Image (tube, grey):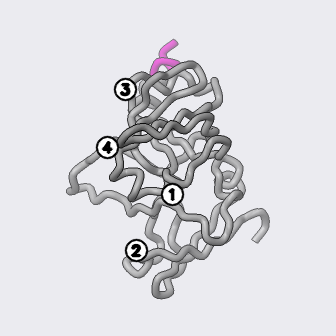
Amino acid sequence: SGTNQTFWVSSPLSHQFKIDQSVSHNGVCLTVEEVIDNQHKVTAIEETLRKTTLENWEIGTEINIEQCMQMNGRLDGHIVQGHVDSTAICTQLKTLEGSWEYTFMFNEDFAHLVIEKGSISVNGTSLTCFNVTNNTFTVAIIPYTYNHTSIKQIQAGNEVNIEFDIIGKYVSRMAKVKA
């Protein structure tokens, strides 16, 4: 209704979801509203649509789906909340022997949140940045990540969801408030 967008998502995980559960969809935290067999329904509001790539989804688009970590679970990667900060554009894809490198361009307003060897989420996948500039970063992808996430579908010119490291965001906020 209104400017909201409803999605029915097919996934082998859907049958495990519960109504009102938060689930990451390409890095975007969305609430499960309904579950029918291997499909679940979610709705994105205008704010979410404006800050993410959800409006670009088409029927058949492969996305990363991930349930929230249980608080008694092991933390692998970094904390990814599903609160997308911005989008970025893939400017270069290099296929190397046994790995891939993706370079992304992002809004320079966020330059203070991207650091060399720091964590970043690209479409919900926790990755490590290198070759960082004021508006670009590169990530290296191992074969397992390439084969088990939707990153393999990203081509030069494609837009992705990015979420900066929450610890870096808090440190940045505290520094601004103290200044």
Q: Amino acid at mark 3?
A: Lys
Task: Kindly identify which residue carries mark 4.
Answer: 77
- The image quadrant that residue 16 belongs to is bottom left
Element marked by disc 3: loop
- The image quadrant that residue 159 belongs to is top right
Marker disc for residue 13 = 2
Query: What x and y, as percent, mark residue 161?
Result: 57, 46
Cα gap from disc 4 to disc 3, whole angstroms: 12 Å
Magenta span dominant secondary structure: helix
Q: Is residue 6 left or right of residue 72?
A: right
Q: Residue furthest right?
A: 2
Cα gap from disc 2 to disc 3, whole angstroms: 32 Å
One can see residue 173 in this view: no
Identify which residue is drawn at 75% across, 71% down. Answer: 1
In this rendering, the answer to whether 24 lies above or below 12 is above
Task: Kindly identify which residue carries mark 3.
Answer: 117
Alpha-carbon neighbours of circle 3 within 10 Å: few (<14), some, or many (≥20)? few
Query: What x and y, as percent, mark residue 48?
Result: 64, 53
Identify which residue is drawn at 44% across, 40% down. Answer: 100
Marker disc for residue 29 = 1
Alpha-carbon neighbours of circle 1 within 10 Å: few (<14), some, or many (≥20)? many
Identify which residue is drawn at 38% across, 39% down. Answer: 97
Query: What x and y, as percent, mark residue 114?
Result: 48, 26
